[in-house]
Amino acid sequence: AGAVNMPLLRRGVARSVSRAARQGRTHKSQLHTASSAEVAWVYSREYAVLDGWDSGHRFAMEKYPRLFDRLVQRGVLSPSEVCEPADPAGNEWLHRAHSAEYVAGYCDGTLAPNAMRRIGLPWSPAMVRAVRLEVAGTLLAARLALSTGIACNLGGGTHHAQRAAGSGFNPFNDLAVASLALLAEGAARRVLVVDLDVHQGDGTAAILSEEPRAATFSMHAARAFPVRKQRSTVDVGLPNGTGDEEYLRLLREHLPPLLDEHRPDLVLYDAGVDCHGADAVRTFCRGHLSLTDAGLRKRDFFVMDECLSRGVPVATVIGGGYSTDMDELASRHAIHAEVAAALANCS
């Protein structure tokens, strides 16, 4: 399951990615600095379940193809460069982060109605395939990053899913699955999840809380969902309306010490854009922040540059974003990909 679709890989990285995946490990010599990183792109059109989708649904399903098309139009990536997860995430991966009973219940549609309502997505076989493909995409991006330096999954960031329950449009937790899979395989000795979505990465924190080789960093609106927060390795809860200057000051204060203390072999970065001041999250959530496009760009550059300057590969996911203007939302989600491409182009 989750095999790399090799014809879609750029020729320059195909052999090294295949070798690293087969060996299930990486070495310090494979790590990249900002001056030597390449970007691997991961995406599947099947991330989006558009057939019969309710256009009034709060979750912006159309953002996936809009983001991909925007990046192609802007020349950030070419379709021929994209690595597509060949298969949805298998149970052997999902069971690392979720109970077998929950995985089976969601996949066959037999969860209790209240459990399905808590997830918040309409159930269908196509939706099950889509969410499993997103998990596979994040794991593929993580493996690719170990060889290229940077990899961007143009989906993912399903950080609310708990071990035995989904929540907040997140049936399965791709960040936890990828972390635990790479640690179990020996591909990484230590992993750090950096979550800058407006919401706390509560599911990720809970699932990884008993894994000492995994650390979690969440900087979020203190009043945002979920009401009952989990304990991350480092949590920074922000007051409503926090803007660029204070946000970036706190990020600079808290992230570098954690990178130096935990010394991860890989960072999984949730670059959610629902912390933007114009995001529609403020219309339905008690907590909200006020970052601008420029603030998001500085945020993303800081995170990736801090990692790469330490020789730590970065795999990104897009996280949350709820604007009803799909062009506007795609442009915000595109920022982290543009930053990744710019860092690679500096080499």
Image: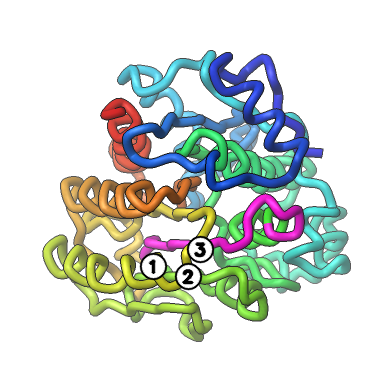
What is the total number of numbered labels drawn onto the structure image? Answer: 3
Q: Which residue is mark 1?
A: 260
Q: Position of residue 69 (x, y in %)?
A: 42, 23
Question: Is 185 in the magenta?
Answer: yes
Identify the residue at image location x=32%, y=34%: 35
Pick the front one: 55 or 334? 334
Q: Which residue is mark 2?
A: 262
Question: Which type of secondary structure does the marked residue at label 1 adopt?
Answer: helix
Q: Which residue is mark 3?
A: 192
Over which residues does the magenta segment extend? 183-198
Q: Is residue 282 left or right of residue 211?
A: left
- Tell me if residue 202 comes above or below residue 230 in the rendering: above
> Going by the picture, which residue comes out furthest to the front?
29
Q: Position of residue 63 (x, y in %)?
A: 45, 38
Give the CA distance from mark 1 to mark 2: 6 Å
Q: Earlier in the sequence, mark 1 or mark 3?
A: 3
Q: Is residue 22 left or right of residue 242?
A: right
Identify the residue at image location x=37%, y=61%: 196
The answer to whether marks 1 and 2 mark residues whose Cβ atoms lie closer than 8 Å is yes
Q: Earlier in the sequence, mark 2 or mark 3?
A: 3
Mark 1 nearby-residue class (10 Å; few <14, some 14–19, many ≥20): few
Q: Position of residue 9 (x, y in %)?
A: 60, 20
- Tell me if residue 2 comes above or below residue 244 in the rendering: above
The answer to whether marks 2 and 3 mark residues whose Cβ atoms lie closer than 8 Å is yes
Residue 177 appears anywhere in the view: yes
Pick the front one: 276 or 141? 141
Q: Is residue 315 left or right of residue 162?
A: left
